[in-house]
């Protein structure tokens, strides 16, 4: 990688879309297998007569090139973490052979990802767009690369030191772009340009670059400049702004009631800033804006994508939908209809249709029946080609820079070539993890964003032992939790200090005391974590919610991992942590508090703490953030990861 080169951002031509002129035909696919329609090849057929129709091969490939499907970063089908959404290898290979133009990946190590991206490109009939949601560094999704604090940490810093925050944001982008490209990704699905001005937002939260339009715009633009200078495409999301919502579009269709003037003041400036910085693509939001379109969500609305984004904001790059498998779309439209509506509205690329075969069949039928103009799709394909061409130009520039730096011919037998080979350095600069400058960046980001008060945690000697001190660790789901592996500092550092861990998640036994319905009335809380069935469980007592009799008699160190996450529906908003703090303090048992993630939970708990109670917050949840936070709380280095040397 060449550290200082610049690349031209991808661009496209301006186009106009139109409303449908004819109703969509009902289509079915012959030969499909499986309940979700993802398996098996199919022929396009009209439902009425059942006769197979062979579509124009060039049209079929054109349509296929505009789809981006989901795959696992792992190599084997049996390793898929989300088999409901991640296509198996046979289906991936078939679809890529048909000309499907992109794959979004999740899971696996950095080394495995490099192998996987090469494998997918070898299967493909066209150059691929290979992308991932690496909003917090490539290591957020692929172990062995850099995992950085969430962007909102820099949004908070921006209010105090804008110059430093913007410099760090550009370095953040360079780190993300450099590592993505090294592992075979060419499209980074970030930055999040949503302004998180609603603390109750269940899904954006710390993913945003700011809580004001100014901070979010300046930092998102800096990220774009840094990442695209490393030879990858970026994606500003979620247009026209998902920050001021209280619903998760993975689960339902959020409503944003703001008028155009409000959008211009808050939601749109970060997207304008990213576009001015040359961002290659924009991702749509699945939310309804009645002031712009009363009928269709932004992803399916020409008023939003063509009129607002293309015409008014002047964006000429790629427009990609958010995942069409999300409930905000699938609850209202079938896979084929959603894909057609998105393209009609002005999208260029269809991300994660619920059924790729059905989506392609419906788009082909829409063109053949005059509902979609073929020229409209060709314009999208041209934008895609230009984006890929910008990547190839960047590759040539990088090769030229390397040749200048190494006058000897690069090859297995040359001095320059022997320094980094597939055998000795299989991942290049990432072969032994992140390079030193990226490690320094990760640590600087954690330390700059860390907040601490109240001194250090101390334990009386009588608290040590099996019945003594505990650390209550709250997570959404402990199974496969990437930041709470057995060697996680939240476990090892606390354990070395004498705290026995108790992990609380959605499937663990409940620690809550059940409310007396007559005494509590409407004041009781609805449980969200730590119940076998939250929807049908009895409410939690608002006065002393923890069942302390089940938690021994010793001090309690609270470690709360809380942030906005897809599919959760809330950021722990239904859990009575304020009452827990008061209860533990009244019992003299609160040894300390650690909050990882949401600043809003920290800000709600901090005023309740008695003077001298050790407490700290980090926006990050990854092991590096845990270690730095617990060290400032006075919890020393662990003596070892576990009692044995093997499992």
Image (spheres, helix red, strand yellow):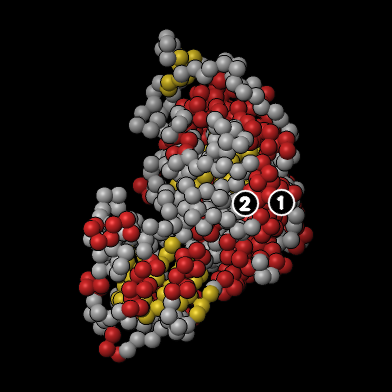
- Residue of label 2: 193
Up the image or down, 630 lies above or below 599; here it is: below
Is residue 134 visible in the rendered image? The answer is no
Choose top left, top right, bottom left or bottom right for residue 28. top left
Q: In this view, does 585 lie above or below 364?
A: below
Q: What residue is shown at x 55% (from left), y 27% (from top)?
A: 340
Instruction: Find residue 177 and report its horizontal and vertical position in percent.
Output: 63, 56
* Residue 551 sits in quarter: bottom left
Q: Residues within 10 Å of mark 2 (few under 14, many from 20)?
A: many
539 or 494: nearer the viewer: 539
**Can residue 562 be seen?**
yes
Residue highlighted by disc 1: 273
Kindly identify the residue that appears in the image at 68 percent across and 44 percent down: 261
Q: Is residue 492 left or right of residue 8?
A: left
Q: Which of marks 2 and 1 is nearer the N terminus?
A: 2
Secondary structure under tag 1 reads: helix
Quarter of the C terminus within the rendering: bottom left
Which residue corresponds to the image point at 58% horizontal and 65% vertical from the top-left? 153
What separation in Å lies between label 2 and label 1 (alpha carbons)? Answer: 9 Å
Residue placed at 47% from the left, 47% from the top?
247
Question: Is 27 drawn above or below residue 200 in the view shown?
Answer: above
Q: Which numbered tag is attached to residue 134?
A: none
The quadrant of the picture occupied by the N terminus is bottom right
* Residues at circles 2 and 1 in contact by the CB criterion of under 8 Å: yes
Q: In this view, does 479 lie to the left or right of 292?
A: left
């Amino acid at each position: 990688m060449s550290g200082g080169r610049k690349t031209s951002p991808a661009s496209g031509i301006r186009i106009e879309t139109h409303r449908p002129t004819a109703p969509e035909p009902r289509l079915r696919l012959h030969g499909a297998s499986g309940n979700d329609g993802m398996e098996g090849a199919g022929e396009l057929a009209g439902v009425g007569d059942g006769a197979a129709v062979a579509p124009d091969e060039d049209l079929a490939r054109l349509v296929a090139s505009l789809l981006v499907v989901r795959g696992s970063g792992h190599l084997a089908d049996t390793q898929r973490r989300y088999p409901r959404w991640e296509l198996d290898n046979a289906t991936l290979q078939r679809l890529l052979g048909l000309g499907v133009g992109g794959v979004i990946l999740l899971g696996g190590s950095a080394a495995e990802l490099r192998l996987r991206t090469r494998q997918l490109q070898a299967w493909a009939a066209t150059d691929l767009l290979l992308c991932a949601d690496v909003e917090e560094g490539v290591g957020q999704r692929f172990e062995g690369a850099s995992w950085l604090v969430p962007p909102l940490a820099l949004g908070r810093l921006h209010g105090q030191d804008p110059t430093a925050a913007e410099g760090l944001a550009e370095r953040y982008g360079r780190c993300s772009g450099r590592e993505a490209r090294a592992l075979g990704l060419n499209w980074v699905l970030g930055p999040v340009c949503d302004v998180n001005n609603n603390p109750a937002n269940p899904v954006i939260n710390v993913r945003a670059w700011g809580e004001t339009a100014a901070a979010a715009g300046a930092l998102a633009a800096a990220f774009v400049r840094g990442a695209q200078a490393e030879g990858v495409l970026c994606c500003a999301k979620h247009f026209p702004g998902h920050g001021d919502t209280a619903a998760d579009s993975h689960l339902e269709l959020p409503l944003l009631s703001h008028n155009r003037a409000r959008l211009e003041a808050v939601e749109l400036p970060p997207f304008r800033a990213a576009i001015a910085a040359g961002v290659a693509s924009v991702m749509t939001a699945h939310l309804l804006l009645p002031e712009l379109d009363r009928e269709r969500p932004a992803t399916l609305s020409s008023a939003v994508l063509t009129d607002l984004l293309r015409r008014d904001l002047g964006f000429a790059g790629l427009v990609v939908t958010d995942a069409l498998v999300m409930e905000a779309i699938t609850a209202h439209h079938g896979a084929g209809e959603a894909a057609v509506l998105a393209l009609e509205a002005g999208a260029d690329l269809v991300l994660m249709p619920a059924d790729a075969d059905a989506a392609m069949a419906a788009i082909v039928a829409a063109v053949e029946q005059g509902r979609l103009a073929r020229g409209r799709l060709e314009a999208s394909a041209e934008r895609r080609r230009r984006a890929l061409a910008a990547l190839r130009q960047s590759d040539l520039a990088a090769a030229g820079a390397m040749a200048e730096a190494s006058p000897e011919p690069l090859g297995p037998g040359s001095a320059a070539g022997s320094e980094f080979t597939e055998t000795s350095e299989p991942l290049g600069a990432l072969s032994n993890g992140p390079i030193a400058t990226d490690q320094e960046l990760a640590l600087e980001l954690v330390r700059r964003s860390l907040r601490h008060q109240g001194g250090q945690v101390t334990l009386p000697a009588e608290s040590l032992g099996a019945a003594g001190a505990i650390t209550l660790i709250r997570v959404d789901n402990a199974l496969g939790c990437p930041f709470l592996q057995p060697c996680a500092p939240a476990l090892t550092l606390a354990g070395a200090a004498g705290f026995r861990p108790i992990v609380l998640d959605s499937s663990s036994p409940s620690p809550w005391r059940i409310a007396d319905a007559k005494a509590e009335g409407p004041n009781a809380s609805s449980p969200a974590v730590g119940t076998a069935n939250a929807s049908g469980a009895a409410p939690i007592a608002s006065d002393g919610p923890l069942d302390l009799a089940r938690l021994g008699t010793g001090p309690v160190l609270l470690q709360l991992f809380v942030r906005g996450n897809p599919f959760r529906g809330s950021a722990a908003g239904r859990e009575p942590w304020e009452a827990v703090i008061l209860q533990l303090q009244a019992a003299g048992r609160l040894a300390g508090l650690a909050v990882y993630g949401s600043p809003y939970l920290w800000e709600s708990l901090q005023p309740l703490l008695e003077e001298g109670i050790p407490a700290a917050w980090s926006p990050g949840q990854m092991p590096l953030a845990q270690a730095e936070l617990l060290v400032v709380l006075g919890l020393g280095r662990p003596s070892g990861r576990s009692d044995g040397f093997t499992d």
